Image (cartoon, helix red, strand yellow):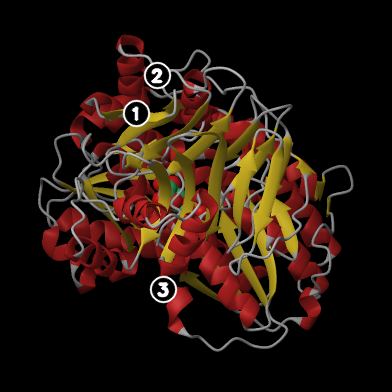
Amino acid sequence: MCGIVGILGRDAVAADIVDALKRLEYRGYDSAGIATVQDGHLDRRRAEGKLRNLEALLNEAPLVGRTGIGHTRWATHGPPTERNAHPHMTDGVSVVHNGIIENFRELKDELTASGTTFSTDTDTEVVAHLITRERNTGASPVDAVHATLKRLEGAFALAIVFAGEDNLMIGARNGPPLAVGHGTGEMYLGSDAVALAPFTDTITYLDDGDWVILTRDSMDVRDAEGNAVERAVTKSVASALMVDKGNHRHFMIKEIYEQPEVISHTLSHYLDFAKGEVRDLSGSIDFSKISRVTISACGTAYYAGMIAKYWFEKYARLPVDVDVASEMRYREAPMEDGGLTIVVSQSGETADTLAALRYAKGEGQKIASVVNVRESTIARESDVILPTLAGPEIGVASTKAFTCQLSVLAALTLLAGKQRGRIDATQERRLVEALSEVPRHITTILKDEAPYEALAQDLSRARDVLYLGRGINFPIAMEGALKLKEISYIHAEGYAAGELKHGPIALIDENVPVIVVAPDDDLFDKTISNVQEVAARGGRIVFISETDAERAGCPIAASLPVPKCDSFVGPLIYTVPVQLLAYHTAVFMGTDVDQPRNLAKSVTVE
Ligand code: G6P
């Protein structure tokens, strides 16, 4: 997946394209490039690596031209080199692409057989050559694109410009999002409205299968058959302000520190603290009539879904199936008619999660989405939107969005328990109060980062790290391991503490740190038994708990204290130490914390 942008401007557009690409870097940062139409010809600049490399190149060799397209890449086909960087072009056509052309091999063979020479390893290059071949037979740019689109299979958002056409840009959408921005005598295309926010808040979202012909003052949207279709013009609320790091070293630590505030903000949207009650913001969901909930998501959001399963089943006595979206979309799981599917996604654009949503919809499910970006495709395709109020999350490793997802799902659990007669008013008040204390507890943890900094040096030497947790804290162990892997590149696994003896215990020796998430809940003693099994084999135990490390009854290498809290909110509190541990380890090792290698913030390919 990648970020794309296109501008039909009044003046030279390269600087504005760079500005928009900065807002899309969350979609990938393997390479970047821009092409413009200059004096009837196409010209481009491309650079491997982050956008700043392209900026440096443009300073040395500026691009002029009032019509242009730009791209920031997350490599799918072909290594992240300058050669493979977009835009891809022939003499007559230049293309940027987000997605995967799944039949590109067949198309490439066909083109090669008829004499086309390819200069990249990408799937995208076939699009430029197909359009060019059509143009060479005398087709107009519009007809050439239409004929080409009919040949493409897979997922794509495209922006296309043409030599000799200073007032024309064509976009197409099949899968990944694409928005048109309307200016005054200017027109824009972008992967999202945020990218276009500095220029316009007047946006048209294209539907799947749409393609659009733009000039500086016209928009002509067509469906797959080429018929003109109407698409609404909306006002976007995306902010033009670029979020900065404030006085923090990285976005990730800034976002960790924002948690008390954004959790508070999110909780107060769903809970009435004064009355000790949950608000009913679920729209048309009636949990008393639902017999099963399905939750689907990817990555960190999936772990939020796993935690919700424990909550819903225990407090609302409501069975939950939870599945990673990339599996759910193809599993052909039968779903109960009239059931509820909850999808969880920070970006609201994750391709697999969107596909899981569409599958569930096809199975007659009502769809509720827990999303951070309210204008996202997932939000727009849901029956009920349950927003997280985390604000923009820039660090690729999700932190505050995760704890806000948990906040929403905890509130929803209360609502479900109440509607199903499983939570009475006294219990509701107690649980609302427990949630209201979460920001204070997190603030307490954040007051002392010294133990994390000290431990980071030790962890940085490990080849493998194990995280253990039981019950509702098992997903926290998985989240801790994921955070460490993502940003420090140390291999880590999260395991259900009781499963340790069925395999991973074979890994334990004095070189393997074992991080134990051990809240003082009714499973504490069980967890401690597993800790002792580790200690007996020489493992180095890092103990994250609200209780005294001495209760472990065995040597502890390090202890990370957590404030005493109600076990209902444990996952919200115990997440913060595993975030800090991963962060400080990565900082000590000098990795690129906010933009770790090979990852992207929003994954719009499957
Ligand atoms: C990527 C990100 C993760 C995120 C996952 C799901 O892998 O790096 O941090 O958890 O996608 O993203 P979503 O936007 O759907 O929550």
How far is disc 1 from disc 3 in space, using C-alphas?
Answer: 40 Å
Q: In x, y percent, where is residue 59?
A: 35, 11
Q: Which mark is residue 44?
A: 1
Give the residue drawn at x 66%, y 33%.
Answer: 216
Q: Is residue 492 above or below residue 107?
A: above
Residue type for callout 3? Glu
Query: In the rendered image, which residue does mark 2 sit on?
Result: 63
Residue type, numbered disc 1: Arg
Image height of 452 relative to 232, above or below: above
Q: Earlier in the sequence, mark 3 or mark 2?
A: 2
Q: Judge by depth and name the residue closer to the eye, 593 or 232.
A: 232
Q: Are marks 1 and 2 in contact (CB under 8 Å)?
A: yes
Pick the residue in front: 581 or 80: 80
Marks 1/2: CA distance? Answer: 7 Å
Q: Is residue 539 visible?
A: yes
What kind of element bears circle 3? Answer: helix
Residue at image mark 3 = 327
Answer with the quarter of the image where residue 319 lies: bottom right
**Do tag 1 and tag 3 residues touch (Cβ < 8 Å)?**
no
Of the image marks 1 and 3, the number of the one nearer the N terminus: 1
Q: Please name which of the two marks, 1 or 3, marks the residue nearer to the observer.
A: 1
Of labels 3 and 2, the one closer to you: 2
